[in-house]
């Protein structure tokens, strides 16, 4: 992965969709990928604020386009679901990023 948190955004978006569709096994795998991507951002000196903002903006964009996706038209996204997804994603990013920072301190 390069210094652009784009891969992180992609993983985060995939994870958000999986979480909203309630697939625990897939969510667990994607959380691990998200943590590894966040660790790579830490190694590349991408500020954690930039990484977290990228995740929030990615989710915001997904929410705007979600109702227009014909494959997910029947799925309702509630505010509480969005808050929960953002909490899980932010925690995974922080965990992966800070573990890497501590490893290299």
Image: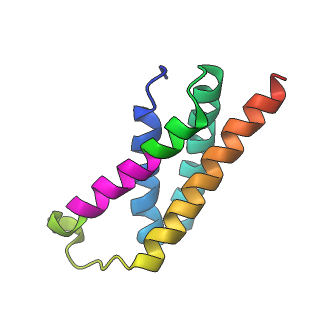
Q: Judge whether 66 appears above or below 43 on screen.
A: below
Report the magenta stretch's main SS. helix
Q: Is residue 104 left or right of residue 86?
A: right
The magenta-colored residue range is 55-65
In this view, the residue in front, 12 or 24, is 12
Q: In the rendered structure, does residue 64 fall within the stretch colored magenta? A: yes
In this view, the residue in front, 70 or 96, is 96
Percent from the top left, x then y, of residue 10? 39, 42
Q: Is residue 98 left or right of residue 65?
A: right
Residue at (39% x, 61% y) in the render: 17
In this view, the residue in front, 31 or 90, is 90
Q: In the rendered structure, does residue 76 fall within the stretch colored magenta? A: no
Placement of the C terminus among the 4 image quadrants: top right
Residue at (57% x, 41% y) in the render: 33
Q: Quadrant of residue 63?
A: bottom left
Q: Judge whether 56 appears above or below 10 on screen.
A: below
Does residue 25 show up? no
Q: Judge whether 71 appears above or below 12 on screen.
A: below
Residue at (61% x, 21% y) in the render: 45
Percent from the top left, x then y, of residue 102? 82, 31
Percent from the top left, x then y, of residue 28? 60, 56
Residue at (38% x, 55% y) in the render: 59
Q: Judge whether 7 appears above or below 70 on screen.
A: above
- Marks counted in the figure total 0
């Amino acid at each position: 992965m390069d210094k652009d948190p784009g891969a992180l955004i992609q993983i985060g978006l995939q994870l958000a969709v999986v979480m909203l569709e309630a697939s625990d096994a897939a969510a667990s795998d994607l959380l691990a990928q998200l943590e590894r991507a966040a660790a790579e951002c830490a190694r590349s000196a991408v500020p954690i604020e930039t990484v977290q903002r990228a995740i929030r903006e990615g989710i915001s964009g997904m929410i705007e386009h979600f109702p227009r996706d014909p494959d997910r038209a029947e799925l309702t996204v509630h505010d509480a679901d969005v808050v929960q997804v953002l909490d899980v994603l932010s925690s995974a990013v922080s965990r992966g990023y800070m573990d890497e920072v501590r490893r290299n301190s």
